[in-house]
Amino acid sequence: MQRVNAMKLKYTLLVMIILVGLYMAACSKNHTTVPEADYPKKIIGRWQGEVGTTKEKMSIKDDGTFTCQTYSLSFIANTHSQKFVTGMFYGKWNINGSMFILTITGSNNEQIMDRIDSFYINSFKMDKIELKGNNGITSFYRKRSFWYNKDERW
């Protein structure tokens, strides 16, 4: 009986070691720095980040288009202010070296239509990107495999 228990324990430990190894390998892959030549391929996907008091969810597609949903993080803006309006805008994207360029072609807010924004890519890992805007503000985005909100139209 002791021999059976010892074998079960060895088997359990072996499975645990394998699972921990697989988990660590998966985590380290996400923290690998993306080479600049791979930026256009690796930026494709869904990203979520914060810029000042605004949260953004951006879907970057392989056909060169993007959609971005913005909303305020501020408690006051979310509960008392009528001025902040959740925004949705879309357009085309391009990467030139370490510059990430967004050309906004449409939105639900006329103030941000027909605008080009460019961002310097400070750091790009498989699951995290750091962008610095022309205004000097640095923002961080995390890659998301999925999110769901019935109001989003991607």
Image: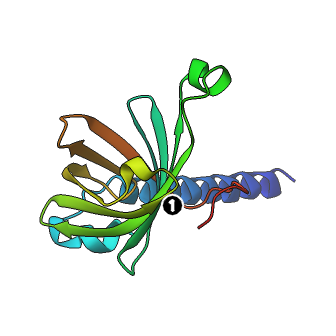
Q: Quadrant of the C terminus?
A: bottom right
Q: Is residue 67 above or below residue 135?
A: below
Q: Residue 90: where, in percent of width, then height?
A: 44, 63
Relative to 74, residue 46 above or below: below
When asked about the image quadrant of residue 60, the answer is bottom left
Instruction: Please tell me whether mark 1 sits on a helix, a strand or a loop.
Output: helix
Residue 35, position as x, y percentages in the image: 18, 65
Q: Quadrant of residue 34?
A: bottom left
Identify the residue at image location x=24%, y=56%: 33
Q: Report the amino acid beneath label 1.
A: Leu
Task: Give the residue furthest to the front.
Answer: 110
Circle 1 residues within 10 Å: few <14, some 14–19, many ≥20: few
- Please name the residue shown 39% across and 73% down the image: 65
In this rendered view, identify the residue nearer to me: 7 or 30. Answer: 30
Toward the viewer: 133 or 33?
A: 133
Q: Is residue 124 visible from the viewing direction of this image?
A: yes
- Name the outermost residue toward the bottom: 63
Q: Is residue 102 left or right of residue 19?
A: left
Query: What is the tally of numbered marks visible in this picture?
Result: 1
Res. 45 in view: no
Report the side of 45 relative to 77 (left or right). left
Colour style of the rendered protein structure = rainbow
As drawn, the residue found furthest toward the right would be: 1
Q: Residue at x 17, y 43 (%)?
A: 134
Q: Position of residue 42 (x, y in %)?
A: 33, 68
Can you give x and y, in whole percent of width and height, for residue 149 in the image? 69, 54
Rendered view: 78 above or below 40: above
Looking at the image, residue 93 sits to the left or right of residue 10; the answer is left
Q: Which residue is mark 1?
A: 22
